[in-house]
Amino acid sequence: MSTASPASLPPLGVYVHWPFCAAICPYCDFNVHLLRNSQTDPADWLRAYRRELAHAQSLRPQGRVETVFFGGGTPSLMSPDLVGGILSAIEEMWGLAAEAEITLEANPMSAPETHLKALRAAGVTRLSLGVQAFDDGALKFLGRTHSAQDARVAFEAAQRIFPRASFDLIYARPNQTPDAWASELSAALALTPQHMSLYQLTIEADTPFYKHQAAGKLILPDEDASADMYEITQSLCASAGLPAYEISNHAAEGHACRHNVASWQGGDYLGIGPGAHGRVSCLEKGARLSSVAHRSPSEWLAQVETDGHGWAELHPLDGESVEMEAVLLGLRLVEGVGLDALAERGVHLEAARLADLRAAGLLSADTSRLQASPEGRLVLDHLSGRLLA
Ligand SMILES: C[S@@+](CC[C@H](N)C(=O)[O-])C[C@H]1O[C@@H](n2cnc3c(N)ncnc32)[C@H](O)[C@@H]1O
Ligand code: SF4
C-alpha cells in the first residue's frame, strides 16, 4: 500500500464462493465438488460464511461494500435464504452501498423462474447464466445437462426478473468453424443481452478434456481458425453495441460487471468461502494482503469452526507481486489503466520500456495510460512479459 489512510483505500467488494455443482463439466478446473445434500445444510453454511466475513471485517472494517459476487461452482443451487443471510451479514458489518451490484452465477438447470424471483427478492441484482453454447450437440459434448432452449428460457426469465443479466458462451470448440460460430453468436445477440462473457475453450490440466486431448481424441481448431473466431466475436459484438471491455467480456455502455472491473483495477475484494482468493488493504498491518482459502469444503468448514476463517494463506503482497498483478490485470481491460492510478498503488513502470512498446504498436499511443493496442491484445502474454522482464 503506497498510502495509509481510510480515504486512500480502494473500493470494497466481496467474492463469495459456492463450490457445489449438480454435475461436473469435463472442461472445468474451478474449485467444484459434486453436490451431496448432506454437505450443504444452509444453516451450517450461513454460520460459516458469517464467521469468515467477520474475520475479514476485523482486517478491513472501513468503507461500504460496493459489489458482491456469488461465484462457483453453481451458486444458483444456494437457497435464497442463504444468499439473503450472507447479504444481511454484509449489510450489518459494513453496510451495502445504495446502488450495490450483487451478481450471482447460475446454471440454466437450477434457474426456474420461481427460484430466480426468490433470489431477486433476497437482493441479487445481476444474474450471470452459464449457457456455454446455443447448439444442442455442442452442449452434449461440453457435458451440459440443459438444451439450448432451456438456456433461452432461463435467460429470458433472468432479463425480466433482474435489473441486469448476462450469459457465458464457450467458443473455438472442436469442429466448430468460424461460420458456425458467427451464426451461433448472431443467434445469441438476437436475445438482446447487454452483457456477455465469451471464452475460447481452454484445456485445463487434470480435466477429462485434458486426457481426451492427450489421447488425440479432442482436437481444438487450429490457430488461424481460432483467430478468425476471435475477430468475428469482436466485430459482431461491436456492431451489436456490445464492444469488448475486457479480453472475454462484452457489454453495452454502462453494463460492464462492476465487481470484476474494480478487481482488475486494483480494488479490494474479500474472498469468502472454499478456495476463494482475496485482496485486502489492511491499515492496521500497513499492507495489502492476499488470502487463499482451503479448497476442500469440509476442510474449510472445519477450519472456520476452529479459527474463524478457512484461509490456508494470508500474506502481504510484496512490491513485485503488486506490479505484476497491476500490469497483467490492467492490460486485460480495453481501456487499460491510468499511469497515475498505478503510481498511487506504488507501481512505476520504466518510461523507456513503455515508449519502446508504443513504438512497436503493442501499446496504445496514449502516454497517460497503460493500454494494450488491438494488436497488443492478441499477444498479451508476450506484451506483459516484455513489460515485466
Ligand atoms: C462458474 S461457471 C458459470 C456458472 C455455472 N457454474 C455454469 O457453468 O452454468 C464460470 C464460467 O467459466 C467458463 N469456463 C469454465 N471453464 C472453462 C474452460 N476450460 N474454457 C473456457 N471457459 C470456461 C464457462 O463459460 C463458465 O460459465
Ligand atoms: S462450468 Fe459451471 S457447472 Fe460446470 S463444473 Fe464448472 S462451475 Fe460447475
Image (tube, helix red, strand yellow):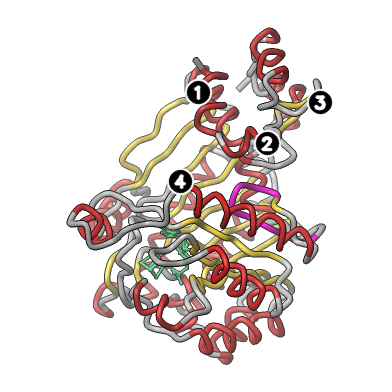
Q: Earlier in the sequence, mark 2 or mark 3?
A: 2
Considering the image in quadrants, where does the N terminus appear?
Answer: top right
- Residue that numbered label 2 is attached to: 10
Q: Is residue 287 visible?
A: no
Is residue 313 shown left or right of residue 233?
A: left
Badge 3 local density, few (<14 within 10 Å), some, or many (20+)?
Answer: few
Structural distance between the alpha carbons of marks 1 and 2: 27 Å
- Residue that numbered label 4 is attached to: 55
- Residue that numbered label 1 is attached to: 385
Which mark lies nearer to you, 2 or 4? Answer: 2
Q: Earlier in the sequence, mark 4 or mark 3?
A: 4
Badge 1 local density, few (<14 within 10 Å), some, or many (20+)?
Answer: few
Badge 2 element: loop
Badge 2 local density, few (<14 within 10 Å), some, or many (20+)?
Answer: some
Q: Amino acid at mark 1?
A: Gly
Image point 43% across, 57% down: which residue? 201
Write down the region rendered in magenta: 245-252
- Residue that numbered label 3 is attached to: 366
Q: Earlier in the sequence, mark 3 or mark 1?
A: 3
Which mark lies nearer to you, 1 or 2? Answer: 1
Q: Is mark 3 within 8 Å of ligand 1?
A: no
Q: Amino acid at mark 3?
A: Asp
Badge 3 element: loop
Structural distance between the alpha carbons of marks 3 and 1: 20 Å
Q: Earlier in the sequence, mark 1 or mark 2?
A: 2
Dots 2, 3 in contact, CB < 8 A: no
Q: Earlier in the sequence, mark 2 or mark 4?
A: 2
Q: Earlier in the sequence, mark 4 or mark 1?
A: 4
Badge 1 element: helix
Q: Amino acid at mark 4?
A: His
